Amino acid sequence: MLTRCNATITCMIMALAFPSAAGAGVWQQATVQPPPPPSALFACAPQHNHPELVGWCHDGCLYSLVHVNAIKQMDEFYGLVQVGGMVEARRRTIALLQLVWLADNRELFSLFQLGIRDTTASVWSLVQLNLLNWQSQPQAPCPKGSNCSGGTAQGRFNGGLQLGLFNRGEFRGLVQAGGVGNYSNDFGGGLQLGLGNYAKSFWGLAQLGALNWIDDLELGIQGGVVNVVDELHLGLQVGAVNVVDDDAAGLQLGVVNYVDDDAEGLQVGVVNYVEEDLLGLQLGLFNLALEQVEGAQVGLVNWASSVKGVQIGVVNRTGRLQGIQIGLVNVVDKATFPVIPLINASFGSGQRG
């Protein structure tokens, strides 16, 4: 179904292609109009039909190869280049280049968008470069002549590079880079780069910054000074401090590695800590698992409530052992002989045989 703007373009093309009396009437109706109202300087509104500096306004839709204006409001824009101070398109903008200080669109399709601040709901662009990219999604369908360009929910960037001092919105692309940071409810793509980064859901290549926070890390790498994940499904944390607030499946490399629930995978650091069960390997100076270890602990001091596997260190301690302890001091709390030096082994009931 044609929109009113697309229908206008079709009528003009037909009038030029078929210069009949009916076609001439259509062309005359589209082109011969009374002088534009004073408000046309700042708006291309519904029922407006008048020329622009380089283009035409018809029923809220602005057509122009190169449109330049300090302040302009419209329903839709179609052209090659749009340059302005404050521009609002309530429904759609299609342009090769949008160079606007303050841009507010419902939908933007462009190769390049440059400016100071953008609050477009849905952006499809090769490169978006603004000091502030703040994608805001409207809550309901947009009726004709209504302001539907902004909202409280997050909009989405789709494309290549989103660059800014701060970026907010869902992301599907190659790189989201913010000088101060990035905030995304749903990140999917390549890299999220910034001083501070947050993603509610993340699947991609990497989140890199000083402070990184992901609620749900589906797949990817977190690299920074402090990395926090609520739930780690399949990923890697590399930093000074790595924290998983729920279950973890993956790899932690850092000075301090902490998992607040069960862990499956590898921890490598100075201090490795698992609040519940560990299925995998801890490699560090101090390794602690408050419940059961199925795998290995290798370090200066190894501590676990129960071990099914191997502990190798200077001091090894566990409540129950099904496996081997190798160290200067080996402690099994519930064994017949709780303290055994050098080598301790048990493969029976969980106590030293």
Image (cartoon, rainbow, N blue to C red):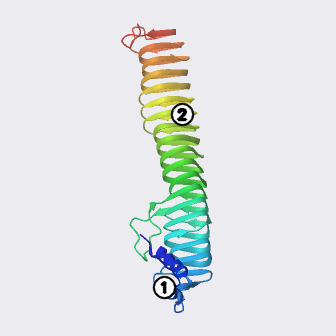
Q: Position of residue 281 (x, y in %)?
A: 51, 24
Q: Residue furthest bottom?
A: 34
* In the rendered image, the vertical position of residue 54 relative to residue 228, given as above or below: below
Mark seen at residue 252: 2
Residue drawn at (54%, 21%) of the image? 298
Of residues 161 and 351, which is closer to you in this image? 161
Mark 1 surroundings within 10 Å by alpha-carbon count, few (fewer than 14), some (14 through 19), many (20 or more): some
Residue in the image at 51% along x and 88% along y? 28
- The x, y position of residue 50, in whole percent, is 54, 86
How many badges with numbers are in the image? 2
**Residue sitting nearer the eye, 184 or 239:** 184
Label 2, secondary structure: give it.
strand
Identify whether 203 is placed above or below 167: above
Which comes sooner in the sequence, label 2 or label 1? 1
Q: Quadrant of the C terminus?
A: top left
Crowd band around label 2 with a 10 angstrom C-alpha radius: few (<14), some (14–19), many (20+): many
> Residue 103 placed where, x, y %?
56, 69
The answer to whether residue 171 is seen in the rendering is yes
Q: Position of residue 188 (x, y in %)?
A: 51, 49
Q: Quadrant of the N terminus?
A: bottom left
Q: Residue at x 44, y 66 (%)?
A: 151
- Are the two marked residues, 2 and 1, in contact with CB atoms closer than 8 angstroms? no
Q: Front-most of 246 and 192?
A: 192
Residue 341 visible, this orientation: no
Disc 2 or disc 1, which is closer to the eye?
1
Q: Give amino acid for label 1.
A: Val
Q: Amino acid at mark 2?
A: Gln
**Secondary structure type for disc 1:** helix
As measured in the structure, the alpha-carbon distance from the residue carrying label 2 to the one carrying label 1 is 69 Å
Q: Decide which of 239, 157 is in the foreground and name it.
A: 157
- Residue 258: mark: none
Residue of label 1: 26
